[in-house]
Amino acid sequence: MIAVNDSHLKAIARAIHFVRSGISFSMTPTHREHIEHDIVLLDQIHKFCRQQITEPGLPMSPRPAAQVNNGEKDGPTNTKAAD
């Protein structure tokens, strides 16, 4: 596979739908949890593929970038009184 395209997105969306439709209350809670976790993973793949189509080659950030705290507590501090 060289590039990701719309047909990949459609396939992942169908997979998510079929996995969701397969969940029933007759399953054990553990089995349901595993399937729900798989749905989350498929959704992450769907988002990654969509990003690769719109911005090829850029990696997805695992989390939004945190803002740096530029307050007075940052950097070295001198607790001694000036002479």
Image (tube, grey):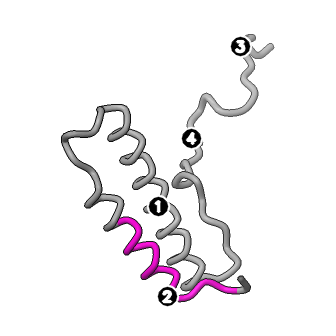
Query: What amino acid does circle 1 point to?
Result: Leu
Tell me if residue 20 comes above or below residue 1 in the rendering: above
Mark 1, residue position: 42
Q: Is residue 59 left or right of residue 83?
A: left
Which one is in front, 3 or 77? Answer: 3
Q: Position of residue 13 (x, y in %)?
A: 39, 73
- Whole-angstrom CA distance, mark 2 to mark 1, is 15 Å
Seen at 66% across and 67% down, the residue is 59
Q: Which mark is residue 7?
A: 2
Which comes sooner in the sequence, label 4 or label 3? 4
Query: What amino acid does circle 4 point to?
Result: Asn
Q: Which mark is residue 69?
A: 4
Q: Which residues are magenta?
A: 3-16
Q: Please check the rendered image and state whether residue 13 is part of the magenta-colored stretch, yes or no.
A: yes
User: What crowding class fits label 4: few (fewer than 14 Cα within 10 Å), some (14-19), or many (20 or more)?
Assistant: few
Q: Which mark is residue 79?
A: 3
Q: Please check the rendered image and state whether residue 59 is part of the magenta-colored stretch, yes or no.
A: no
The nearer-to-camera label among 4 and 1 is 1
Seen at 72% across and 32% down, the residue is 75
Which comes sooner in the sequence, label 2 or label 1? 2
Q: Position of residue 64 (x, y in %)?
A: 52, 54
Seen at 55% across and 69% down, the residue is 48
Circle 3 sits in a helix, a strand or a loop, which is it? loop
